[in-house]
Amino acid sequence: MTILIVGAGFSGAVIARELAEAGLSSTVIDSRPHIAGNCHTERCAETGVMLHRYGPHIFHTDDAEVWDYVTSRATFMPFRNQVKSTARGAVYSMPINLHTINQFFGQTLRPAEAQAFIASRAAPADVPATNFEDQALQMVGPEIYETFFKGYTEKQWGLSPRALPASILKRLPMRFTYDDNYFSHRFQGIPQQGYTDLVARLLDHPAILTRLNTPYDPSMAASADHIFWSGPLDGYFGFRLGRLGYRTLDFERFTDTGDHQGCAVMNYPDPDVPYTRITEHKHFAPWESHARTVCYREYARAAGPDDIPYYPIRLSAEQTLLADYEALARDAQNVTFVGRLGTYRYLDMDVTIREALNTARAFLVRRR
Ligand code: UDP
């Protein structure tokens, strides 16, 4: 059986590995010159800092099997993402927690007092919020929404928060304690040698052939019994119904000596600052030490046809087009669509791995 896996990110690598361990060979192709997709990490030749080339990736999950899967293949170092936000001339703690509330309102509230205080400002939650803005007004009230979320979200998505789904904000916790961990998951960390090393370990099996700089060509389908497609869903169909919208990111890289900002991620929600955040990559590897430092200013914009797709937009216009592509995907013979691009969803790494494991296992069961 000839199996072709398109894309050497987590989806493709996990599927290839699961099939290989069950005795099935596959070829993994990727159009880029490297593996690991947008999780790719590489050492900066100039500074020695491990760079998250397509933006920061912190592994966080509640899925014990996925955590075991990754930590049994690479050493993970403990990492807590303690994001800060520079807004209206001051630096605040993120995500919104008791410290942020006390800093922002100049108070010394204890947890129950802060909860009552925010509740007095927040919009009533008698009807469920259907968009980002209403969700934020119900959760934190207008002052925090306008300072920390409105400008950031407009820059990130290029749209009014009223046009965005409430689910985007629900990614973030809100706490009435001083816990400033950006994520609430049980297991969190970053691979000591980077994500590319982890993906290389997954692909390192005699039954897996990896070919880089190899874009998919429809003629390849003729010689494959099955294709696992982790490229863009609309790309598989030659964009014949139109293009699904994505946001892309531009990174403006700069270097400095020592420590530039004192943390890994500094958000800039003010609308007059053109970027959304600055990431300082050495802080994603606090177990290393480097004399110099590398930072990325991150700018979001609509993805054009030649840009790297990052965030699927999934508004009502996209939903209709997506449904049409999903119908084509259901009818496609011997192709399985996987991952963030293949299913056009905003997926974290752990969910991507979970779904890839499930996909590979279901495929193996069907073959029996
Ligand atoms: N967000 C915001 N202000 C912040 C951080 C996040 O308004 O300081 C909003 C923004 O709309 C973003 C969403 O919350 O798209 C989810 O944030 P998350 O940090 O999960 O985004 P990601 O890291 O996936 O880009």
Image (tube, rainbow, N blue to C red):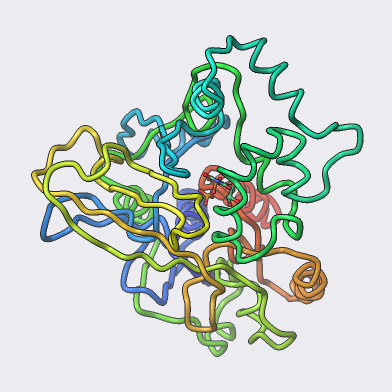
Residue 36: quarter of image: bottom left
- Relative horizontal placement of residue 196, taking residue 164 as reference (left or right): left
At a point 55% along the width and 47% down the height, the residue shown is 348
> Residue farthest to the right?
127
Q: Is residue 177 visible?
A: yes
- Depth order, front residue of 358/262: 262
- Relative horizontal placement of residue 141, taking residue 323 as reference (left or right): left
- Depth order, front residue of 133/242: 133
Residue 80: quarter of image: top left
At a point 81% along the width and 66% down the height, the residue shown is 316
Residue 25 in the image, given as x and y percentages of width and height: 46, 63
Residue 37: quarter of image: bottom left
Residue 351 in the image, given as x and y percentages of width and height: 59, 45
Residue 271 in the image, given as x and y percentages of width and height: 52, 57
- Rendered position, 200 above or below 341: above
- Depth order, front residue of 27/172: 172
Residue 23 in the image, given as x and y percentages of width and height: 48, 54
Q: Is residue 226 visible?
A: no
Q: Quadrant of the N terminus?
A: bottom right
Q: How many marks?
A: 0
At a point 56% along the width and 43% down the height, the residue shown is 148
- Rendered position, 64 above or below 284: above
At a point 53% along the width and 13% down the height, the residue shown is 108
- Depth order, front residue of 193/303: 303
